[in-house]
Image (cartoon, coloured by chain):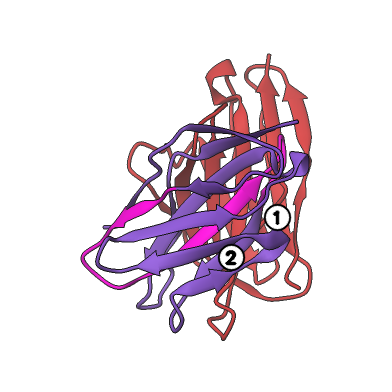
């Protein structure tokens, strides 16, 4: 089945530094990648949608200069949290969609727990 | 735009008892519906999905859900739960017309199975 590998699983960084999160589709081509953020005991909130080779589309209220998304290939998308602050601490999850087919799947990464100290 | 309401934030149930987790959606267009399970500090695992066809959908781990268009519901059921079913469950919806539409999630239901 479709697998998305997300790294790192958890990261602790100092305030003011940047953190990069990677999501790789291992056995399919991810034409679209969605990035979500999840606060403790809350639902997943969509941050942005990225298509391979084009700029990401950000949801209202999400700072595009702070959350840099790159989707340079059909198997790799990255989210970089720039100048991280404690309020950016959260669980970040990517979701990849393959070219539309019979299974119409959304495959999720295992998530990244970011703690900014 | 689509939206999802999960009516119960927490559902405690005894082991081997049946359970129903409720989900209602709102949309002006036709949709696809999904149920996911999330264990602590992990990503989401697909339980089942409704795309078209039979309104009763069977998924993994003994779960099933029924799509009811007139009531705009997609409730998740399991006839007999196990301790290992303790987790967070999310109902999600997306536009069925194709394109790069994301999943929209409900707020989740915490299922706690009591021994």
Callout 1: chain:
A
Seen in the image, is A47 located left or right of residue B5? right
Q: Colour of chain A?
A: red
Callout 2: chain:
B
Seen in the image, is B20 located left or right of residue B25? right
Taking the image as drawn, is residue A27 in sight?
Answer: yes
Q: Which residue is disc 2 drawn over?
A: B48
Q: Do labels 1 and 2 share a chain?
A: no
Expressed as whole percent of the image width and height from the top left, the position of residue A52 reads 56, 69
**Residue at figure coordinates x 46%, y 32% from the top left:** B9
Span of residues in magenta: B22-44
Q: Chain B is drawn in which colour?
A: purple
**Residue at figure coordinates x 65%, y 72% from the top left:** A74
User: Is residue B109 positioned above or below A46 on the image?
Assistant: above
User: How many other residues sit within 10 Å of disc 2, few (<14), some (14-19) or many (≥20)?
Assistant: many
Q: Quadrant of the C terminus of chain A?
A: top right
Assign a secondary structure to mark 2: strand
Assign a secondary structure to mark 1: strand
Q: Is residue A117 magenta?
A: no
Taking the image as drawn, is residue A56 in sight?
Answer: no
User: Is residue A14 positioned above or below A8 on the image?
Assistant: above
Expressed as whole percent of the image width and height from the top left, the position of residue B82 reads 74, 44
Q: Nearer the viewer, residue A57 or B110?
A: B110
Q: Which numbered disc covers residue A23?
A: 1
Q: Which numbered disc covers residue B38?
A: none
């Amino acid at each position: 089945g479709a697998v998305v590998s997300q790294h790192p699983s958890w990261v602790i960084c100092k305030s003011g530094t940047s953190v990069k999160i990677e999501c790789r589709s291992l056995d399919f081509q991810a034409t679209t990648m969605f990035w979500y953020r999840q606060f403790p005991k809350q639902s997943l909130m969509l941050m942005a949608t990225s298509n391979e080779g084009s700029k990401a589309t950000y949801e209202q209220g999400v700072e595009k200069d702070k959350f840099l998304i790159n989707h340079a290939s059909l198997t790799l998308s990255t989210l970089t949290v720039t100048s991280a602050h404690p309020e950016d601490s959260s669980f970040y999850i990517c979701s990849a969609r393959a070219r539309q087919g019979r299974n119409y799947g959304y495959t999720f990464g295992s998530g990244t727990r970011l703690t900014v100290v | 735009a689509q939206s999802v309401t999960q009516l119960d934030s927490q559902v405690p149930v005894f082991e081997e008892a049946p359970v129903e987790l409720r989900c209602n959606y709102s949309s002006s267009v036709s949709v696809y519906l999904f149920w996911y399970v999330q264990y602590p500090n992990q990503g989401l695992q697909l339980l089942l999905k409704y795309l078209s066809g039979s309104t009763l959908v069977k998924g993994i781990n003994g779960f099933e859900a029924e799509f009811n268009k007139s009531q705009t519901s997609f409730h998740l059921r399991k006839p007999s739960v196990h301790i290992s079913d303790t987790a967070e469950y999310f109902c999600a919806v997306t536009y069925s017309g194709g394109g790069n539409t994301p999943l929209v999630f409900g707020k989740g239901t915490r299922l706690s199975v009591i021994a």
